[in-house]
Image (cartoon, rainbow, N blue to C red):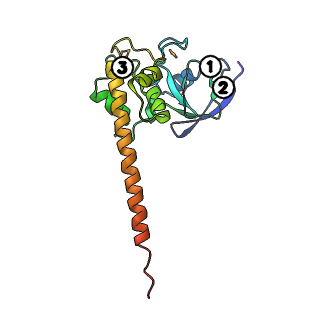
Amino acid sequence: MTTTHVTLTVNGEQREADVEPRLLLVHLLRDVFGLTGTHIGCDTSNCGACTVHVNGRSAKSCTMLAVQADGAEIGTIEGLADGATLHPLQQAFWDQHGLQCGFCTPGMIMQAAWLLSENGDPTEEEIRHGISGNLCRCTGYVNIVKSIQQAAGSLAEAESARVVAAATTEGQAVTAEPATAG
Ligand code: FES
Ligand code: FES
């Protein structure tokens, strides 16, 4: 069996494996790296359950070969939380009941994370269009849309708090300059 050595950065960590050329990225993540948060719903690029980030863009990992991801930066649902603190999207799905069985949720959240990185203040229509490649058979999408709207608000608040904090620190640095004797 011919294998190819691949090296990827997954959630900030370098990972390596010898893979068969036919191995899909989703199987590399799940079966070789043990990152089973990425789901397989259809294997035919329809459902979006396998959505991850590849070099900052969302991608259905059942549509890519592992060898095509050699050298890439991959983000999966496991890398979204900050330790015990949920990502605003994870918190919003919790708060807004954006899931029922949860099967579509990791892919939905990864798709939404990419959507919000491209457009921090999407309209309902833009959200629905943005997640149109991710299928959910349980929720009817209403609470998913609400979850993404809540997360957009939380991320915008966090960003403005960060800007204010940076400006304050900068101001302190300026006022901390030693006064010249005069
Ligand atoms: Fe990849 Fe359904 S498993 S799109
Ligand atoms: Fe069940 Fe979406 S919550 S498929």
Q: Earlier in the sequence, mark 2 or mark 1?
A: 1
Q: Which mark is residue 108?
A: none
**Residue 39: where, in percent of width, then height?**
46, 19
- SS under mark 2: helix
Disc 2 marks a residue whose amino acid type is Val
Image quadrant of ligand 2 equals top left
Q: CA distance from mark 2 to mark 1?
A: 8 Å
Q: Is mark 3 within 8 Å of ligand 2?
A: yes
For residue 142, side relative to residue 26 (left or right): left
Residue holding disc 1: 23
Q: Earlier in the sequence, mark 2 or mark 3?
A: 2
Name the quarter where the C terminus is drawn: bottom left
Front-most of residues 93 and 118: 118
Around disc 3, counting alpha carbons within 10 Å, would you say few (fewer than 14), some (14 to 19), or many (20 or more)? few
Disc 3 marks a residue whose amino acid type is Gly
Residue holding disc 2: 67
**Residue 177: where, in percent of width, then height?**
44, 74
**Residue 30: where, in percent of width, then height?**
51, 23
Disc 2 to disc 3: CB gap under 8 Å: no
Front-most of residues 8 and 98: 98
Which residue is found at the position 43% from the left and 68% from the top?
Answer: 173
Q: Which mark is residue 102?
A: 3
Q: Is mark 1 within 8 Å of ligand 1?
A: no
Instruction: Inspect this view and state whether residue 123 appears.
Output: yes
- SS under mark 1: loop
